[in-house]
Amino acid sequence: MSFAFSGAVSLRGPAMKAVIASSGEQAWQLQDVPVPEPAENQVLIRVHASGVCYNDLHQSRGTPGHEPAGEIVAVGPGVRSRCVGDRVGVLLWQSACGRCEWCQRDKPLFCSHIVGTSMHLPGSHAEYMLAYADATVLLPEGLTYEQAAPLFCAGYTAYAGLRAADPRPGETVAVVGIGGLGHLAVQYAKASGFRTIAVTQSTDKETPISDLGADEIVRDGRALAAVGGADVVLGTSRSMSAQSDAMQGLRPEGRMVIMGLGSAPLEVSAGQLIMKRARIVGSQHNGREYLYQVLDFAARGKVTAVTESYDLAEAAAVRERLLEGAVRFRAVLVM
């Protein structure tokens, strides 16, 4: 993978501040780097807000950050759909080969040559970033940069998981793990019209998650079953044991959607799956149409990302707070 800035960069030109990760274990450093220039089909974005995702902690090289929201300040050759002044966010997966089986089937997520923000291109924890114009999404009027940024990964992931479960009218949705993903998943389930149950052992989260729309709060899978169970369980926790435990509360023909990624294996009872005819579904950013709906819910005030805002210069301290589990729901770097 290459983490060099894409496009022509003048080493004598203007500089910008950017967070640089030298390894997965080392603290982030704020450095001066050249402001990049957009190449063909690219735009240069002045980043106004950049959400901090737990996956940023795995960044071992280059500029982390894949939840950007900002303003286009320059466009490269060939760009027709975007212009200077547009308020945009950027997709995690920016481009694919366009030639393989999966691209031809309009499923570029599975392309082996897919290009990702902060993985193959520099990320958004910086004053400016490059993006392919086709990977930018216009922000709805009234949606602030700070609110929009976390939706480009956390909100997108949560809502795409809900849609992947194909919930039907009258069904119940449970959310396991009320953190950066989970607090948004609760809101999207409720805003979509479903009875929504939060599954958490954190008693200090009961009041805020009730305020965000949870109809009930239970401690574990057994308690979930005791209140009638759920047709859809959204697993947003990094604890795979918590996600496994929640399956006790799946109703017959229920769907367990795995979105939270942990290092431990997911333990599954084959008998439980067979007898209940239950399904386990893996999910990520499943379709661009879902991101449109994610942003629309937020713009209409149906969903609110609960955030802690920090200056870009505080990025290293935010990383430590994230490692310690001290961030309440979502952190955002503002420029």
Image: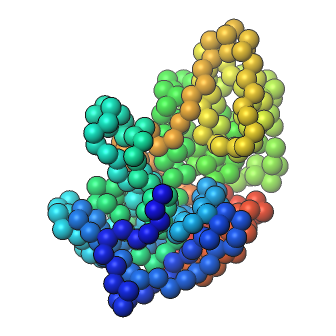
The colour scheme is rainbow
Q: Is residue 2 above or below residue 36?
A: above
Percent position of residue 269, x then y: 75, 18
Give whichever of 297, 250 is nearer the camera: 250
Residue 147 in view in this figure: no
Residue 128 in view in this figure: yes
4 relative to 84 in the view: left or right: right
Q: Is residue 78 above or below residue 18?
A: above
Percent position of residue 147, x then y: 50, 63
Percent position of residue 270, x then y: 72, 15
Q: Is residue 324 above or below residue 272?
A: below
Percent position of residue 25, x then y: 71, 65
221 relative to 313 in the view: left or right: right
Q: Residue furthest front?
A: 1
Could you say which quadrant of the image residue 217 lies in?
Answer: top right
| Residue drawn at 18 percent across, 68 percent down | 77
240 relative to 172 in the view: left or right: right
| Residue drawn at 74 percent across, 62 percent down | 323
Counting every numbered tag in the picture gives 0
Give whichever of 304, 71 is nearer the camera: 71
Could you say which quadrant of the image residue 26 lies in?
Answer: bottom right
Q: Residue furthest top?
A: 275
| Residue drawn at 68 percent across, 51 percent down | 179
| Residue drawn at 75 percent across, 52 percent down | 205
Give whichever of 114, 133 is nearer the camera: 114
